[in-house]
Image (tube, rainbow, N blue to C red):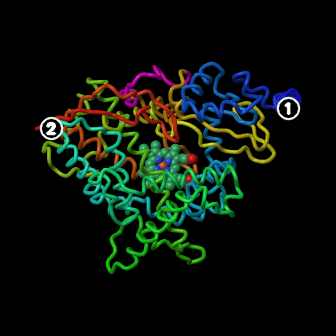
Amino acid sequence: MAVLLFAYWLSGAIKRKSSTTLRYIPGPWLAPFSRIFSIINIFTCKQVHRYRNWHETYGPMVRVGPRSVSVTDPAAVRQIYGSHAFRKTRMYDAFVVLGENVFGSRDPEFHKRRKRLVAPAYGQTTLAAIEPLIWRAGVESLMEKLERQAAAGQVSNLFQEFMFMTFDVVGEVAFGRSFDMLRRDGHPILKWLEDFSRMNMFRIMFPFLQRVRLPWLFGHWYESERRLYAFTRDAVERRKREKQPRRDALQMLLEAVDEDTGDSMTDAEIMPEMLVQIVAGTDTTSITLSWCVYLLSQHPEIYAKLREEIDAVLPEREATVSYATVNKLPWLDAVLNETLRLYPAVADGLPRSVPKGGAELGGHHLPGGTVVFCSAYAMHRSSALWDEPESFRPERWFAPAEKLAEMKKAFIPFSAGPRACLGRSLAWLELKLALSTLVRRFEFEHVPGARMEPIYKFMLTPMDHHVDMRLRPRT
Ligand code: HEM
């Protein structure tokens, strides 16, 4: 029996290897035969290193599975992400939390309609209105907590504190009030979301679970789902009862009107969009800040340059920092860009499906249905695209305009095209306010112990989820 099964697998594998034009794309010898590497990735979380090495060995197009290809050629990457032609794959169903939404949707028509409705929630007018909320609920609350930890002689785990900060900001702007995680060291929504995403994974693997409920098996996950729903609904209803609501992201969603039909969004449509802001807008930003402070702690000369630049525009330690003051600082920009290059939080994946009929990509013909994706980690560290790719050199971002334009083609921390990050202006605002205030108020020094090797588990994080720093208040 075992021999028969093996023979069956082998004949299928050989057919898969030789029957498509993918056979001309180089890659590890096992990749065309089986999806073994996707499975290994799930268990080891080290695919970013693997993809980077493969691209260094095989070039900009690497076959990584029977029907999947990893791409780092900038022109091919723009082709994949630059339009709706290459659609998101089924993997994105995992992001359909409480309903179809702008992030998880695979349908271009739905996405275009929904994006028009939600765009004002991420726009400049909203950002200007919520800046004081981000300062109060996020940055200032974080500084107060760090002040207390420093006074008590405690080491601060900035990985965790930045995460709490970004959750509190999304709570404030998308749910109408902070989750208060910085003060309470957590919130039950963390568990509800974790349970919910596990349940969703099962629903994707076994679609009958969309229709059938198995309370004896998944009872506690259903309970988390119920609580998440009730919590989100409560936030919407609370806001609707307010006589003079403030102009934040939640309000923009409630006031959104479809230009063509004149329809507003229903509560059932608004709720998934609120959750998207948590799923897409918390860890991404906090992890970027974590890597950034770690890199600064390892490069004292860069840290000193940044401190000098920030001290010049923020002479008073305690003053409220405005975005206008820190928005255009060359070293701050360069340090954050270089962090996003070396440690892009969304370092891998973003799978897309080649359209029916196939496509020419990177000099190869790929049949329809082939899964293609760009590993930002591999592209950002490619020796074909960057000088000294593994070095932290923020000054590279001061290159002449022509060189800079070339670099930007190979730089995609927020993806590109119609599905690029909608929250990137908000992310920049949070990143710059938080980092400049931290640098102005504290001297920080890394406390070794936790493993800092990057692993990829949905995001590119340090292995132990710790970035331990000893903080000393500055004058
Ligand atoms: C440093 C921080 C951030 C990084 C590196 C980042 C990165 C990304 C990337 C790579 C994508 C494309 C995902 C894909 O195609 O699968 C994306 C999409 C998205 N991001 Fe961000 N993001 C950040 C912060 C935020 C914030 C703060 C928000 C909102 C609160 C946000 C909201 C979104 C949304 C709504 C999408 C889906 C856009 C669409 O499909 O039209 N992101 N982000």
- Residue hosting label 2: 473
Residue 467 against residue 138 in the figure, above or below: above
Asked if residue 423 can be seen in this view, the reply is no
Residue found 66% across the figure and 61% down from its top: 109
Residue projecting furthest to the left? 475
Dot 1 falls on a residue whose secondary structure is helix
> In the image, residue 35 lies at what x, y percent?
71, 33
Dots 1, 2 in contact, CB < 8 A: no
Rendered image quadrant of residue 33: top right
Rendered image quadrant of residue 462: top left
> In the image, residue 56 lies at what x, y percent?
59, 20
> In the image, residue 120 lies at what x, y percent?
45, 64
- Please report the bounds of the magenta region as a residue range: 384-398
Amino acid type at image mark 2: Pro
Residue found 70% across the figure and 52% down from its top: 206
Residue 388, magenta (yes or no): yes
- Residue hosting label 1: 5
Residue found 39% across the figure and 59% down from its top: 124
Dot 2 falls on a residue whose secondary structure is strand
